[in-house]
Image (cartoon, rainbow, N blue to C red):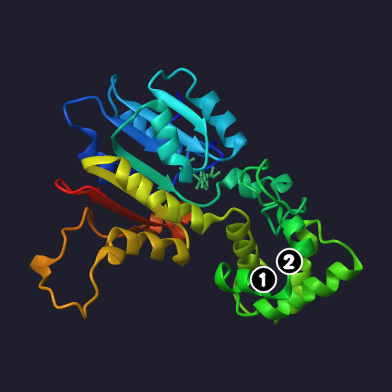
């Protein structure tokens, strides 16, 4: 059987050992445990979880991408502990209800896109390889990036590039897209990448000029932040007391959401309300340990891990989410 991270794997799982160590306290209970890998990808984290689990334990693996699902089915075909479903992780509660899994012990989400998604030109995520401007993780879902760019207003494009791409030159890029699409539809990845490169000042950063815009469009098209916002409470609600949720994020927008949710900031009563800390309602979960990042060796071996942040929360003993 393949190891979790063998060199010919098409996606190298990030913070793998750290994730398993962080979830371990929830995995060995003396009874059969149920785990969820909400973002199966090519199965690196799932394989490591399965190596940790016993014969009576089970693992549900989700992914929204049908190519990932096919690869996961092939990889884990021989393992009767594994359940695989094509679904968005915002549908977690629904999938668990259909399986009649009332409580789970551990949940993992390794957010963002996988290397095969980025590397296959036909998926349309890459500003380095020419392909149709698609960017959907699930090619059956909603509209492609090209369809959106064909009709989006200047204001909408500016907002997406600025908010999700954190692109300082959002407005000039949006205007250039509007001008270009009057001449011909923007349908190819390199067509868009070159258009953006013409707008941005040269040598403005060390990265490709289209990096931030492509990230922004991808996050918007796949509704990545909405997915995460919907997923976090469902995941926490599915955990038994003492169960753990681990989330690996790859940019500050995601990480901020996770951090705020884990600290239950939204559940705290405002500082102006005259109550002592002891009178506040107890929080239904708490962060377990500090945020973890990849070390220099992992970053050297897998540059994609550079921006990864792992956060873990534990469902508290006494209180319902
Ligand atoms: C970073 S990769 C996961 C890699 C995986 N941990 C591994 O070791 O191979 C992220 C995966 O999550 C999937 N994904 C992203 N957003 C999703 C969502 N909202 N629901 C379900 N799957 C999602 C992507 O299709 C992709 O396959």
Depth check: 287 or 225 in front? 225
> Hey, which quadrant is residue 297 in on the image?
bottom left
Q: Residues within 10 Å of mark 2 (few under 14, many from 20)?
A: some
Residue 6 shows in the view: no
Q: Are marks 2 and 1 in contact (CB under 8 Å)?
A: yes
Q: Is residue 313 left or right of residue 163?
A: left
Query: Residue at point 33% right, 60% down?
Result: 261
- Disc 2 versus disc 1: distance between alpha carbons? 6 Å
The N terminus - image quarter? top left
- The disc placed on residue 156 is 1
- Between residue 279 and residue 48, name the one nearer to us: 279
Q: Is mark 1 within 8 Å of ligand 1?
A: no
Q: Residue at x 16, y 61 (%)?
A: 281
The residue sitting at 58% across, 59% down in the picture is 219
Work out which residue is located at the far right of the displayed protein and give it.
183
Q: Is residue 317 left or right of residue 148?
A: left
Please say if 6 is above or below 192: above
- The residue located at (41%, 46%) in the rendering is 109
40 or 265, nearer to the observer: 265
Q: Is residue 106 visible?
A: yes
Q: Position of residue 115 (x, y in %)?
A: 57, 47
Residue labelled with disc 2:
152
Which numbered circle lies on residue 33? none
Vertical side of 99 occupied by 265: above or below:
below
Residue 180 image offset from top left, x and y in percent: 84, 71
Up/down of 55 relative to 59, above or below: above
Secondary element under disc 1, as helix, strand or loop, is: helix
């Amino acid at each position: 059987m393949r190891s979790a991270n063998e060199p010919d794997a098409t996606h190298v799982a990030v913070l793998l050992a750290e994730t398993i160590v962080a979830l371990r306290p929830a995995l060995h209970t003396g009874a059969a445990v149920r785990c969820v890998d909400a973002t199966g990808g090519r199965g690196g984290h799932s394989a490591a979880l399965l190596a940790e689990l016993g014969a009576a334990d089970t693992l549900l693996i989700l992914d929204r991408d049908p190519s990932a699902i096919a690869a996961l089915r092939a990889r884990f075909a021989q393992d009767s502990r594994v359940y695989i479903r094509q679904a968005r992780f915002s549908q977690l509660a629904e999938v668990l209800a259909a399986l009649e899994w009332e409580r789970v012990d551990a949940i993992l989400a390794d957010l963002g896109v996988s290397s095969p998604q980025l590397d296959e030109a036909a998926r349309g995520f890459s500003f380095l390889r020419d392909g149709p401007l698609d960017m959907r993780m699930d090619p059956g879902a909603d509209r492609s990036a090209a369809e959106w760019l064909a009709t989006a207003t200047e204001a909408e494009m500016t907002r997406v590039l600025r908010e999700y791409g954190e692109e300082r030159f959002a407005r000039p890029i949006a205007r250039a897209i509007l001008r270009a699409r009057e001449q011909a539809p923007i349908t190819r990845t390199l067509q868009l990448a070159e258009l953006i490169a013409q707008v941005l000042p040269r040598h403005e950063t060390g990265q490709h000029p289209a990096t931030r815009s492509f990230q922004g469009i991808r996050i918007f098209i796949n509704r990545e932040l909405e997915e995460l916002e919907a997923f976090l409470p469902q995941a926490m609600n599915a955990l038994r007391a003492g169960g753990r949720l681990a989330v690996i994020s790859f940019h500050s927008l995601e990480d901020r959401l996770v951090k705020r949710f884990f600290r239950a900031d939204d559940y705290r009563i405002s500082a102006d309300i005259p109550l002592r800390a002891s009178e506040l309602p107890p929080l239904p979960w708490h962060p377990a340990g500090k945020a973890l990042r990849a070390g220099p060796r992992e970053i050297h071996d897998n540059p994609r891990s550079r921006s990864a942040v792992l956060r873990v929360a534990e469902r508290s003993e006494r209180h319902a989410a």
